Amino acid sequence: MAEHPNISAGHRRPQRHLPLQILLGFLVIYFLVPFWWVIVNSSKDAPGLFGGGNSLWFADQIDYLGNLRQLFTHDGGIYVRWILNSTLYALAGGIGATVLAVMAGYGFAKYRFAARRFSFAVVLGALMVPATALVIPTFIMFAKLGLTNTVWAVILPSLLNPFGVYLMHVYARDAVPDEILDAARVDGAGEMRTFLQVALPLMRPAVVTVLLLSAVASWNNYFLPLAMLSDNRLFPVTVGLGLWQGVASANNAGGTSLWSLIILGSLVSVIPLIIAFFSLQRHWRGGLSVGGLR
Amino acid sequence: MTSLTEKRAPRTHDQKHKIRGKVQRREHLTGWLFVGPFGVVFLAFLIAPLAYALYLSLFQKKLIGGTSFVLFDNYVKAFTDPSFLSGAWFVVRFALVAIPVQIAVALAMALILDAVTSLFTRFSRLMIFLPYAIPTVIGAVMWGFLYSRSFGPLSDVFGLFGATAPDFLSSSLIFYGLLNIVTWQWAGYYMIILYAALQGIDPTLYEAARMDGAGRWQVARRIKIPLIAPALILILVFSLIGTLQFFNEPQFLRYLAAGTIGSDFTPNMYAYQQAFGLANFNYGSAISFALGGLVFICVYAFLFFTRKRRSFL
């Protein structure tokens, strides 16, 4: 590559590099193609979908509203229920997991207690345990307790986030100086108050990151609810769309109209998370670097 | 932050000692109070299921004679079961190809985005990250539509050149179909982690290198990549764990790729099929546990070979 001896302002200076930007442009197109396909094809009804028209362009008659009405009223509005269920699982699982992870990460980082090193090593080891290996035994345990096919079967296992604990540990260790905690204690603050009012604000970027990661993990979860739930009114949207797919492909004649609902349903289901990610961008970007940098 | 405490009047030795002692006595209890709630969840939903899976995997249920203790028979069965072995071979093969591809793509994008700053690169960064916000099953079904013969665009696009479209849902090409899906799904996430690490590098290092006559490529290869090695290893471990327990994408694509993806396509799908399709929980647990062991061995072997670079664990 050409050297630029005259650029002494250095690396952060805006630079154009046209070939690289063009390459980037192609990559962006690649990453957006599936979205484009879904957006375009959810404007079509079933005949338009299978009719052999241009599959990368809109239907002649765009009917999003009609399709949306169909999506939201199909089978007694079950799709709306699935979205609400997904929201509940993501919020309950995400917030619960974050509270536990923040407290544990802070505890591991800031207190010297018995068996601390050993417990933390066990938590790190748990990062390697494939989550799906736990689903089958958890299912049988829950079946014995009568918890399968309830919302708890999905929420309770989602509370476990060892990576969140690791991330919070690293962040609390570096971003919360012991001196500040000691100062708060000397000033008479209790341990809980020190944590809530002194440490927590300092850990905010990492807290938002862990919250977002846990909520996304719950929202995206498929294997766990698929195994745990049999009542389709409790399904999250991932399992629900899977159900429709099964029906649509098993019954090719009567199922064709379902395909257009599945396409629009996929589109609608990704909107909430995209909004969450974009609006919280400023907060999570700082937190993500933590895990990798140490 | 340190200056805050330094400004205070220096405490006497006695006072300090008193504070320390008091804190130490409280530390054991308070430490456990903070860690405790997570500990309970950890025991209930990680340790207990693991132990239970191990226990279950040591038994067999027979039509005649009921459940009996068989020690490692289920594991012997699994490791001689062509379904499990072919699934395990598939995920290992898939990991060997998919992980380097994903990380190479992510690294290249992160380096470009780190080196070039413009409004367009900022926009690209978000768009490339976008697939991470999509549930894996939805990503799989979106690509499944694109691959589909009945409503995908591939036949149109290839028709323009007078060629027949490849069928990524056929058994000969499904490997590449899935490879494309996971790359699309995860490369952006890995890119963001690597990009964050790159942004954390002290820019004066580049100055120094440039003084010594290093070009951009040399800066990337000799400074940037070595300095973000811990982040690279972190995402390698994550993608290894994720790929070996491959489940969501093939399970979801089964409907579109009828006949190509069987119920024993990956070990996890096979375990699911055994447990929930055939109510054979003992054998399903054994497969899960064997897969968990496989993941553990692969990850530890990997960490062992990279132990000099590793600092995140």
Image (tube, coloured by chain):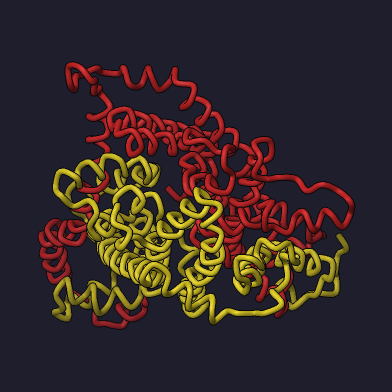
Chain colours: A yellow, B red
Q: Which quarter of the rendering shows the N terminus of chain A?
A: bottom right
Quarter of the image where one finds residue B257: top right
Q: Nearer the viewer, residue A45 or B140?
A: A45
In this orientation, does residue A175 appear? Answer: no
* Residue A150 screen position, x and y as percent: 22, 57
Q: Is B220 left or right of B272, judged from the image as shown?
A: right
Residue at 46%, 74% in the rendered image: A272
The tally of labels here is 0
Q: Nearer the viewer, residue B18 or A212?
A: A212
Residue at 57%, 42% in the rendered image: B258
Quarter of the image where one finds residue A82: bottom left
* Residue A22 screen position, x and y as percent: 81, 68
Residue at 48%, 65% in the rendered image: A288
* Residue A197 screen position, x and y as percent: 25, 80
Residue that protrudes farthest toward the front in the picture: A253
Q: Is B131 left or right of A19, judged from the image as shown?
A: left
Q: Nearer the viewer, residue A156 or B106?
A: A156
Quarter of the image where one finds residue A121: top left
* Residue B95 screen position, x and y as percent: 57, 39
Residue at 15%, 60% in the rendered image: B33
Q: Is residue A152 above or below residue A56?
A: above
